[in-house]
Amino acid sequence: DEVRLRLAKQYLATVAEETKKKDDEKEDDLNFNRDAIAHRLHADVQEARGRAYSNVATKLKDTPPPTDNIRVLRGHKLPVTAIAMTGDDTTAFTASKDGTIVQWDVESGAKHRIHPTDSKFGKGVASMAASSDGK
């Protein structure tokens, strides 16, 4: 418990330091920093729980990306239903209606592992996600 308390205090000090805008703070600035710290803590907890969402569509341009960098990976018997990438973009996972999840090396396109799913939950995989901690 002492270790947790020490780590929590250290984390709060780090967050407070990052959100601090200037040395001479007024009352409004202090309230702003408290709100910023609360927002940052909330975002970190959501990310740790796997409930953080990123809006990617707003960052895309109106023009489609070039098609010369598209790679086709073959490894499922039925259509792919879900794709997930690890946080460092080195590993991808694909799931399909055939009930398998395939782990891919993004750089080489090689299959690392095929994970069969448990048939008692149904044959196909509808969706999946990769956690930010790599587990």
Image (spheres, helix red, strand yellow):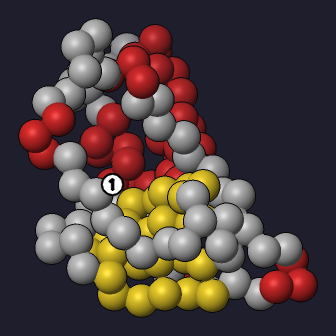
Q: So how many labels did they put on this image?
A: 1
Q: Nearer the viewer, residue 2 or 118?
A: 118
Q: Is residue 94 left or right of residue 79?
A: left
Q: Nearer the viewer, residue 91 or 51?
A: 91
Q: Counting other residues with Cα less than 10 Å from the Cα at mark 1, is it few (<14), some (14-19), or many (20 or more)? A: few
Q: Is residue 32 above or below residue 91?
A: above
Residue farthest toward the right in the current orientation of the protein: 120
Residue appearing at x 38%, y 48% in the figure: 15
Residue type at the position of mark 1: Thr
Q: Quadrant of the N terminus?
A: bottom right
Q: Is residue 32 above or below residue 53?
A: above
> Horizontal and vertical percent for residue 109?
22, 71
Residue farthest toward the left in the current orientation of the protein: 68
> Horizontal and vertical percent for residue 11?
41, 61
Residue 68 visible in this rendered orientation of the protein:
yes
> Horizontal and vertical percent for residue 124?
73, 68
Residue 58 found in image quarter: top left
Residue 33 visible in this rendered orientation of the protein:
no
Q: Is residue 32 left or right of residue 59?
A: right
Residue appearing at x 46%, y 29% in the figure: 55
Q: Residue under label 1, please give it.
A: 14
Q: Nearer the viewer, residue 18 or 56?
A: 56
Q: Is residue 73 above or below residue 28?
A: below
Assign a secondary structure to mark 1: helix
Residue appearing at x 47%, y 77% in the figure: 102
Residue 59 found in image quarter: top left
Q: Is residue 37 above or below residue 95?
A: above
> Horizontal and vertical percent for residue 10?
39, 66
Q: Nearer the viewer, residue 75 or 30?
A: 75
Residue 23 found in image quarter: top left
